[in-house]
Amino acid sequence: MSICLNCGRELGSRLGRNCPYCHAKLEIGGISSKPVYDHLKNDYDSKNDRLLILSVIIPLVGLIYYYTKHEDRPLTSSSALGGSLIGIIVQAIAIVILLLTRL
């Protein structure tokens, strides 16, 4: 059972970012029901292109972000991990090409 902390009404199956009755923003910390909490938590999570690009350029940033946030923000952290892996692969290929051109 989830209850709006602003007006006190039961939300039931009405899930969203705002209370359907008083239109107050629903805070994730005030949710008492696990399914409702999981739905709202995933509603605020999304893939992040800027984090992906930053992780390609600096793979360590993406790896650190993934390991610290993978439980709270699975989609955003997967973007960071994917960017880190791409960055590591690109850097490894660049090193191999540089070494081969010196021979």
Image (tube, rainbow, N blue to C red):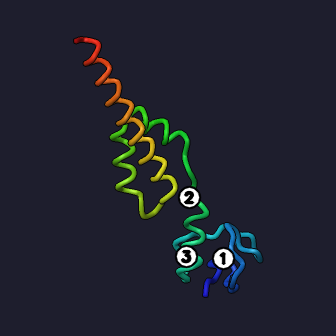
Residue 40 vertical placement versus 73 (above, below): below
| Residue 63 x/y as whole percent | 35, 47
In what element is the residue under mark 3? Answer: helix
In what element is the residue under mark 2? Answer: loop
Q: CA distance from mark 1 to mark 3?
A: 10 Å
Indicate which label's residue lies in the foreground, 1 or 2. Answer: 2
According to the picture, the residue beneath numbered tag 2 turns out to be 45
**Residue in view at x 57 percent, y 54 percent:** 46
Along the line of sight, the residue nearer the viewer: 66 or 36? 66
In what element is the residue under mark 1? Answer: loop
Specify which label sits upstream in the sequence, 3 or 2.
3
| Residue 53 x/y as whole percent | 49, 36
Number of other residues with Cα within 10 Å of mark 3, as a class: few under 14, some 14 to 19, many 20 or more: few
Task: Tell whether 101 sits left or right of 12.
Answer: left
Find residue 10 and report its image quarter.
bottom right
Find residue 93 and report its image quarter.
top left
User: Looking at numbered disc 3 in the image, what kind of residue is underneath it?
Assistant: Gly
Which mark identifies residue 30? Answer: 3
User: Looking at numbered disc 1 in the image, what kind of residue is underneath it?
Assistant: Asn
| Residue 70 x/y as whole percent | 41, 59
Specify which label sits upstream in the sequence, 1 or 3.
1
Specify which label sits upstream in the sequence, 1 or 2.
1
Residue 18 vertical placement versus 95 (above, below): below
Residue 11 vertical placement versus 77 (above, below): below
| Residue 41 x/y as whole percent | 55, 67
Q: Are marks 3 and 2 in contact (CB under 8 Å)?
A: no
Q: CA distance from mark 1 to mark 2?
A: 24 Å
Indicate which label's residue lies in the foreground, 3 or 2. Answer: 2
According to the picture, the residue beneath numbered tag 1 turns out to be 6
Q: CA distance from mark 3 to mark 2?
A: 18 Å
